[in-house]
Image: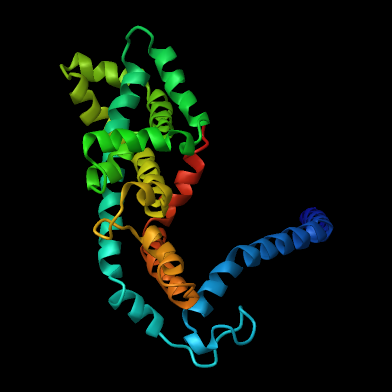
């Protein structure tokens, strides 16, 4: 009897293994096509970076020799040293870091207060004000560029850090919406318990909301920092000297002020890309989580 059961189990195991193998073979063409599409998409996405890298390593005399994607026969780092020393790129890098840090810190602080008010506090017209404010997302930035510049000029903030970071410090509709939606997902009972224990509004924020909101803080911080780092149009408009010039404007100046020096421009591009790559490798888990949280509702 035991031998019959063992034979039956062996036969059933072979049947399941055969069925599993057939399912794998049946799905194989779909997987091959899927991976082929993913590989092709990766190549298309990485190809511009490859061209920028090989161009940044080419001497000026080899810039137009051969295909644009071919690796130079005699690569050089002179373009990087020239961009760093001759064109004051360290100061441009410092200006960009200060601008991005100020914008990120202001975004986190003021978006938290505004989002908590819209999520938890009761006041007349709360929903109307919130949705009217959120509707400004539909207005292109170029529409408000001139009025915003006039406002900065009236305040005397042209070519200052106040004017450079001011429009981004007090929060943005996207940041406030993201924070508000996350705050609304936190159980109200936790706040009620804290208030019973005597905590006020700031106590609730410090003891309940902030510790539970670390994922969304990381999301908003990363998206704001990267957006500020890559911002070009507003720094170009609000600054008119090299005293506050950021990296994006400085890179564009290689084509306008110094001619089309593509090798120097690509070297400067990789210098500007370096901190973002470091940010990605250090916080890649948070970046993946930010992509998930950005569309959670």
The residue lying toward the viewer, choosing from 88 and 121, is 88
282 w.r.t. 172: above or below? below
Q: Height in image: 223 above or below 274?
A: above
Colour setting? rainbow
Q: At 42% from the left edge and 52% from the top edge, which residue is drawn?
A: 232
Q: Position of residue 77 (x, y in %)?
A: 40, 84
Question: Could you say where residue 25 lies in the image, as x and y percent from the top left?
Answer: 82, 61
Name above or below for residue 218 compared with residue 61.
above
Q: Residue furthest bottom?
A: 74
Residue in the image at 40% along x and 23% along y: 184
> Would you identify the image quadrant in which residue 207 lies?
top left
Confirm whether residue 213 shows in the render: no
Q: Is residue 280 visible?
A: yes
Furthest toward the top, the residue is: 124
At x 48%, y 34%, the residue is 143
254, 99: nearer the viewer: 254
Residue 104 location (% of width, % of height): 31, 44
- Which residue is painted at 77% across and 63% down in the image? 32
């Amino acid at each position: 009897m035991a031998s019959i059961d063992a034979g039956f189990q062996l036969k059933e195991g072979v049947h399941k293994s055969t069925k599993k193998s057939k399912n794998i073979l049946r799905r194989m063409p779909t997987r091959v096509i899927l991976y082929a599409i993913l590989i092709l998409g990766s190549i298309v996405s990485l190809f511009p970076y490859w061209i920028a890298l090989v161009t940044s390593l080419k001497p000026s005399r080899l810039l137009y020799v051969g295909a644009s994607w071919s690796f130079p026969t005699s690569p050089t780092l002179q373009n990087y040293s020239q961009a760093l020393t001759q064109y004051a790129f360290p100061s441009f890098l410092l200006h960009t870091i200060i601008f991005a840090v100020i914008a990120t810190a202001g975004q986190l602080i003021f978006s938290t207060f505004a989002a908590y008010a819209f999520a938890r506090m009761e006041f007349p017209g709360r929903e109307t004000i919130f949705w009217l404010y959120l509707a400004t997302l539909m207005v292109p930035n170029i529409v408000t560029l001139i009025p915003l510049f006039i406002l900065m000029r009236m305040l005397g903030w042209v070519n200052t850090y106040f004017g450079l970071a001011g429009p981004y410090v007090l929060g943005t509709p996207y940041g406030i919406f993201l924070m508000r939606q996350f705050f609304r997902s936190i159980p109200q009972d936790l706040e009620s318990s804290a208030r019973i224990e005597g905590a006020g509004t700031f106590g609730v924020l410090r003891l309940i909301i902030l510790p539970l909101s670390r994922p969304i803080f990381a999301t908003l911080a990363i998206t704001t920092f990267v957006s500020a780092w890559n911002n070009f149009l507003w720094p170009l408009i609000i600054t008119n000297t090299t005293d506050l010039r950021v990296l994006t404007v400085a890179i564009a100046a290689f084509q306008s002020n110094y001619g089309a020096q593509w090798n120097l421009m690509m070297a400067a591009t990789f210098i500007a890309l370096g901190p973002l790559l470091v940010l990605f490798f250090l916080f890649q888990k948070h970046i993946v989580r930010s992509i998930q949280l950005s569309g959670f509702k």
